[in-house]
Amino acid sequence: MIAATIQPQIRLCDRKENLRRALALAAGAAGEGAEILVFPELFLTGFCYSQDLSDGEPYPSLDPLRSFVAEHGCLVVGSLVDGRLNRGFCLDERGIGFQDKIHPFGTEKDHFDGGVSISPVETSKGRIGLSICYDLRFPEVARSLALSGADLLVTIGEFPAARGVVWETLSRARAMENQIHHISSNGAGPEFCGRSAIIDPWGRAIAEMGAEEGWIVEKIDLADRDRARREIPALGDRRPEIYRW
C-alpha cells in the first residue's frame, strides 16, 4: 500500500484557497501512486471562529474531494467543522466514516465538544485508527484504536511551531508502543511546525518532512505490524487487571 501525508499551508477562514492548495498537493501525491492521502486537522478552514464555516450531512464542502476520490480510487483523511464537533473523516469510493476529536484543547472548548466514542474507521484501505491533534498527548486514544483492530494509526493536527519536539516525539511513541504504522499530518510553517511523517511499527520514520509545504509518499507493508508484535509481544504482555488511574 502506498500512503502520502500532505502538509499544506492553511489560510485561516479561506476555504476556496485551502481547497485549491489541497487538490494541487493531492494531485502530486496521487501522481506518485498514493492510495491513502492524509491532510491536517481542519485543512479547509483552520480554526475559523470569525465566520460560520460549519458543514453538515451530506458535507457539500467535500464534493470536490469526492470527485478526486472517484477519479483516483484513493482514500482521503482529514477533519472539518460540523456544528460543535471537530469531525475527523475518512472518505473513499464506498462513502465516508467519522471519528470525532476526543480532546478539544484550551479555548477550543468554547467552540467544540469532545467526541464520545473511539473506534477505527472501516475503509476500502483497511481500518483507520484516526486521532486529532491534542489527542496525540493521550496514549489511551491510540491504544484503544490499536486494541480495537486498527490496521494503522493516523494523527492529523495543527501543532504550532513552538511544540515541534512534542509532535515528533509523541508521533513516534504512538507507533512504537502500539507496534503499528503511524501516519502524521500537520500544517506547514511558519505557523505550524510541519514535521509530518510516515512511521513504521518500530518507531522509525521511513519518510518525514521539515516545515515546508508539500507531501511525502512511501510504501507501507501492513504485515509489518504483525511482525513487530511477534518480535516483541508487548500488547499481549500487558496486565490491565492491575493498572489503576
Image: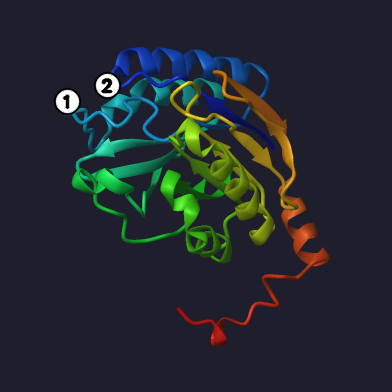
Q: Quadrant of residue 61?
A: top left
Residue receiving disc 1:
51
User: Helix, strand or loop at disc 2?
Assistant: loop
| Residue drawn at point x = 19 percent, y = 46 percent | 110
Q: Quadrant of residue 166?
A: top right
The kind of residue on which mark 2 rests is Cys
Q: Quadrant of residue 13?
A: top left
Q: Nearer the viewer, residue 68 or 216?
A: 216
Residue receiving disc 2:
13
CA distance for labels 1 and 2: 7 Å
Q: Nearer the viewer, residue 46 or 67?
A: 46
Q: Residue 245: x and y, percent?
A: 45, 78
The answer to whether one can see residue 171 in this image is yes
Q: Residue 108: x and y, percent?
A: 27, 44
The kind of residue on which mark 1 rests is Gln
- Identify the residue at the far bottom of this view: 242
Horizontal side of 121 relative to 150 (left or right) equals left
Q: Nearer the viewer, residue 43 or 168?
A: 168
Horizontal side of 219 relative to 101 (left or right) equals right
The answer to whether one can see residue 120 in this image is no
